[in-house]
Amino acid sequence: MLIMIVLYLLGMVLVGALLAKKNNSAGDFYLGGRQLGPYVTAMSAEASDMSSWLLMGVPGLAYFCGISDAAWTCIGLVVGTYLNWLIVARRLRNYSERLGAITIPDFFRRRFHSDGKALQAIAAILIIVFFVPYTASGFAGCGKLFSSLLGVDYIPAMLISALVIALYTTLGGFLAASITDFIQSLFMTMALLAVLIFGVTIAGGMDQVMENARSVAGYLDMTKTANVVTGQSGPYSVLTIVSTLAWGLGYFGMPHILLRFMAISDANKLKVSRRVGTGWVAVSMFVAIAIGVVGFAASRAGAIQGFESASAAESVIVRLASFMSTHSVILALLAGAILAGILASTMSTADSQMLAAASSVSEDLVAGVFGAKLSDKKTMNIARLTVLGIAVLGALFALDANSSVFQIVSFAWAGFGAAFGPVMLTSLFWKRTNRCGALAGMIVGGVMVFVWKFLVRPMGGLLDIYELLPAFLCALAAIFLVSFVTAKPDEAVVKEFEAVRRA
């Protein structure tokens, strides 16, 4: 198992080293020179999206609470994935190329011909604020993996993982992140399918799996939530369902996914990317939920030890793989590949997040806001140092071994979805949007995530809904209101918008 994992980690670093020579400018480092093909675009976008949340968060939630929460979340994400590819991808690709933008904050600045620094600065700061905990969730996933598998301390395991991710991202930039994400998506697929088949076998077959699931009240009910420790169930209301489906809104504001749309070599190939990416997301999420259900049955059958909390249950796939490794050398190798798949899911997101955050510092803050005139070589050096800096911050945030991967991702996802999603949609599809409206929407969306999460939601009742939905709606309202009461966009901005719309 260790041989497989070490080979995998070395392979990722090798990819970064081989692609390092292709980074001759900031555009190459942050956007790969817009050279991605349709399959790499699709799979790297979705692999960078899923993170350890897919292989650890979703199975753990389904294991401990039944299928309702995980299933409604996944339904919202599948729909959001499809709509993002269908609505946003092509127009953002064409618009960003026309403007010469290589980062999301840079796109917003150029879209509104903003001479001021506020729009680009706030967008860059929000990316850093929300990407640090998001990156931390990836490092935490790696730490939990090695801690559960090898019985080593969580902190050194997490730090080694962070070092490897930072190393190949620093060397190879966006191309390395995208190519490794494509490879990692294949490992993730293999891991999901292998664990599912093995889990069903040791649980006693599908009939036994379903019998165990039905033995817990509300476990398979889409309108109830269960607790496998107490055996009790609670209601999963319509309001909660709507709130959970709102996860799909987050896609419109995810910088690390939107950058993939900007990087594809040919906008006409986005249809292929949409089909491949959406199909993979739908299948992988279904399998991830199934692994949670199967893992619960395997623990009931005595094949693996059970879990006493939702956070602990996030290691169910690790425990299944560890048990697999005890049967034969071949299965141990397969288990190692599965664990490499879990690493892949974590690394594929963390590398993209660090890169997006680094671009916000070097391109948007240092060069864009502060106006520093740097050579390509200096820009590249700052970019690489910033990646390392983001990795250090993420590792510091990940020091708590008891933090939930699902909860960390949930908050960061809401932050990006509310701060950037409404602004992105109105920037692409409503020509009356102006700089003031975009700035208001970005600030209101970002602030409301914190306000709703920590002040409003704890009140409970009808207010106990996922913070992304109210923050997204408030941001949209702010954009419309401020854009209407302030000056119309300049004629040059409108002409540019119309030219892209007709393209």
Image (cartoon, helix red, strand yellow):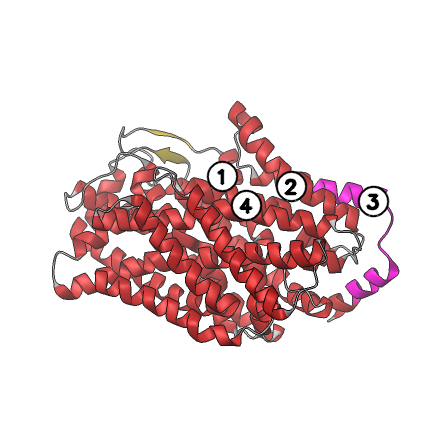
Q: Main SS type for the magenta part?
A: helix
N-terminal of the pair, mark 4 or mark 2, is 4
The residue sitting at 26% across, 51% down in the picture is 318
Q: Which residue is mark 2?
A: 445
User: Is residue 421 visible to us here?
Assistant: no
The residue where tag 3 is placed is 484
Q: Is residue 386 left or right of residue 298?
A: right
Which element is circle 1 on? helix
Q: Please tell me which residue is depicted at 38% across the width and 34% down the height of the picture.
A: 225
Of marks 2 and 3, the one in the foreground: 2
The relative height of residue 133 versus residue 2 in the rendered view (above or below) is above
Q: Nearer the viewer, mark 4 or mark 2?
A: 4
User: What separation in Å lies between label 2 and label 1 (alpha carbons)?
Assistant: 22 Å
**Dot placed on the residue nearer the N-terminal end, 2 or 1:** 1
* Disc 4: CA contacts within 10 A as few (<14), some (14-19) or many (>=20): many
Res. 302 in view: yes
Cβ atoms under marks 2 and 3 closer than 8 Å? no
In which quadrant will I find the N terminus? bottom left
User: What number is the disc on residue 241?
Assistant: 1
Which residue range is magenta in the image? 476-498
Nearest the viewer among 282 and 353 is 353
Q: Image quadrant of residue 414? A: top right
Tell me the kind of residue under disc 3: Phe
Q: Position of residue 143 (x, y in %)?
A: 33, 48
Disc 4 vs disc 2: Cβ atoms closer than 8 Å?
no
| Residue for badge 4 | 130
Amino acid carrying mark 1 in the image: Ile
Q: Nearer the viewer, residue 326 or 9?
A: 9
At x 83% / y 44%, what residue is drawn? 484
- Under circle 3, the secondary element is helix
